[in-house]
Every structure is written in structure tokens, then in C-alpha cells.
Image (tube, rainbow, N blue to C red):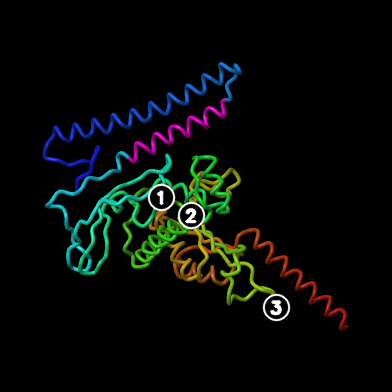
Amino acid sequence: MKRSAVFVRSSSTEVVGATRKKTAARIHQEITREVNQLLSRIFAERGNHGLTDLEAVENALRVVLHQAGAAALSELLQFDVPAPDQRQLPCPCGHHAQYRELRSKPVLTVVGQAQVSRPYYLCPHCHQGQFPADVELDIKDTEFSPGVRRMHALVGQDAPFDHGREQMKVLAGLEVTAKSVERTAEAIGEDIAQRQREEMQKAIQLDLPVVGGQSIPVLYVEMDGTGVPVVKKETVGRQAKTDGQPARTREVKLGCVFTQTNCDKEGFPIRDPDSTTYTGAIETAEEFGKRIYLEACQRGSSRAVKKVVIGDGAEWIRNLADLHFPDAIQIVDLYHARQHLWELARKAVHERVSLLSVR
């Protein structure tokens, strides 16, 4: 495939060099024009009022540089008509797609809106179209660049999607919708989840590479579950904790893995600094067992001299520990141990009082 600007392929070195120079000159000219216009306005404002509004200047400069950057990207993303020997591509149906024309589409990039013009191929047999350049640029079936999609994922992972939209506008100067933040974050999340499922399956099949390194004195695995609020559609058909009340939460299962090398002066174990990694999901105990097992494998559980599983005493945690960490020491964490002891004492007192009342 031939492409103009820095991506062009040609048998003539002179043509390539000339094309690159012309494209670079247009980009430099665009940037210079935009910056000069802004500087003229800034100096005029300073001359009239004797002051410089730094925030206004830096925001205006960002807008100008984004405009120039988007113009530069648009120049770089103009593909040439393919050469005669490159005007057909294999089609998944077994036939060949033929080149039809150059087609353009907008792409929101980290520097603003750009235009990409690329070859379009159509299969005359199954009538399916192809844009090979979209695959190359990682913009297939999307109008967001990889960089913008990464931003979507970052702002959408830990805050409401509308808040993420506002963050994109304030921090990056990009106008997006809350729905685009939601869709992109969820799509990337699903892709990550699929890769994790594949890794978990490999772990269960003992098909993961062995993590080398020194032996680990003690490896801890901790598990717990808690309810998190979810939208109504996520609770359809689910039973609430209180009879007669609609379910408003779903249980997220959480786990962490950390190591211990030393003890303090009193002999209590000390967690190794920065050794804790986390994992979690809203899923069944069976699926979560694979997830926490994978995390432990990646942390080098095969090199652990001693393994410890910490939990709240719940049956599902004990079952997972027996299944995935059969040689581990199982410990009820101190908080829940005290809670269980208090409940036992309360029941014992209640029984004692009941017996005394009967007498």
C-alpha cells in the first residue's frame, strides 16, 4: 500500500524525498501561522492592558497547538491510491476484494479532530468492504484514536462516566460524550477480561511459564467478598438479603497476594513493602478461584516455602483454599476471629439466661 508523506513507498527515492519535504513544509507552515496569530493577540492584549492572564494564555496556546497538531496528523494520514499490483486483497470468504476508491473519516486524536483518507476495498462476491489502513492504525470500527481510547479508559475506570467526560474536556481539551466514555471503557475492560480468562484457563491447565527467581519465605493469599451498589438491570432475578426487598447490590469478590520475609522485634510477621497486588471481579466463587490462583502463580507461588490463606471463615473461601492451595495454612483474620468469638459469647450468654429463666 502506498501512502503519502512519511509513509509513502516508491521505487523513486527522489519522489519520496520530495513528497516528505512538501508535507513537512505544509505542517511547519500551519504551525507557524497558528502560533504567530496567537502571539500577535497576546502581545496586543499586553500592550492594551499591561497584564498577562497566564491561564487564558496557556489554554489558548493549547488550543492552537492542538489545531496545528490535528492539521499535521491529517496531512500524515492521507493515503495514496494503491499501485496497480496492490489493488486487490484476500477476502475472508475466499475470494478477493477489489480497490474501489479513497474514503475519508474523522478521527478524534489526542490533539483534536483529524481526517484520515484511505483506500476502500470491496469484495464483489460477498459484498464485504475492507479498510486495511484502519487495522494498521488501530481505528477499525471506531472514530477514536488509540491514545484517546486510553484516556477514555483511564477516566472511566474509577468515576461516573459524565465526570470522565468533564475530565477529558478540562485536562485534555477534548469534547467527548459520557456515552463514549462508557462504551470505550467497557470495551477495553471486556478485552482485558477476555485475556484474563484465557490466562486463568492456562493456569488451571498448568500451561503458564514458571516464574523464576529466589525462593519466597512466606506467600500470603487473602480473599473476601462485599456487596457493591449496581444499577437495577444488574439485579434482575437476584434475591435480596432481606425478604420482600429488591436486591440493590451484587457481591464483588476481592483478593490480594503479598509476601513476608522478616518479623519485628516481638516476632510478629511484617509484610514486605510494596509487595501487595490485587485482583477482583463480580463473578461466581468458582471463577474467582481461578482468578486468585492465577494471581498467586504470577507472584511466584511455586517458589513459596510456605503459603498462607487468610479469610473471614466463609465456606466458599475455605473451599477455594482447599482446591487451589491445599498445602496452605488457613487463618481467619483477626477482625473476623474477634467477631466470631463475640457472636459465640453472645449466644452462650443468651442460652445461659434462657436456662436460668426456665428454672
Of 168 and 56, which appears nearest the observer?
56
Of 38 and 218, which appears nearest the observer?
38
Pointers 2 and 1 in contact (C-beta within 8 Å): yes
Mark 3 neighbour density, 10 Å: few (under 14) some (14–19) many (20 or more) = few
> Could you tell me which secondary element the residue under label 1 belongs to?
loop
Question: Which residue sits at x=57%, y=70%?
Answer: 233
114 shown above or below 319: above
User: Which quadrant of the structure image shows residue 355?
Assistant: bottom right
Look at mark 1 in the image and give the residue it sits on: 144
Question: Which residue sits at x=22%, y=43%?
Answer: 3
Look at mark 3 in the image and give the residue it sits on: 244
Residue range (magenta)? 54-74
Q: Position of residue 33 (x, y in %)?
A: 39, 27
Type of amino acid at the residue the image marks with label 2: Ser
Q: Position of residue 113 (x, y in %)?
A: 41, 43
Q: Is residue 221 left or right of residue 339?
A: left
Disc ID at residue 180: 2
Name the N-terminal-most of marks 2 and 1.
1
Label 3 to label 2: alpha-carbon separation: 37 Å
> Could you tell me which secondary element the residue under label 3 belongs to?
loop
299 shown above or below 244: above
Residue 76 colored magenta?
A: no
Mark 1 neighbour density, 10 Å: few (under 14) some (14–19) many (20 or more) = many
Q: Position of residue 353 (x, y in %)?
A: 84, 75
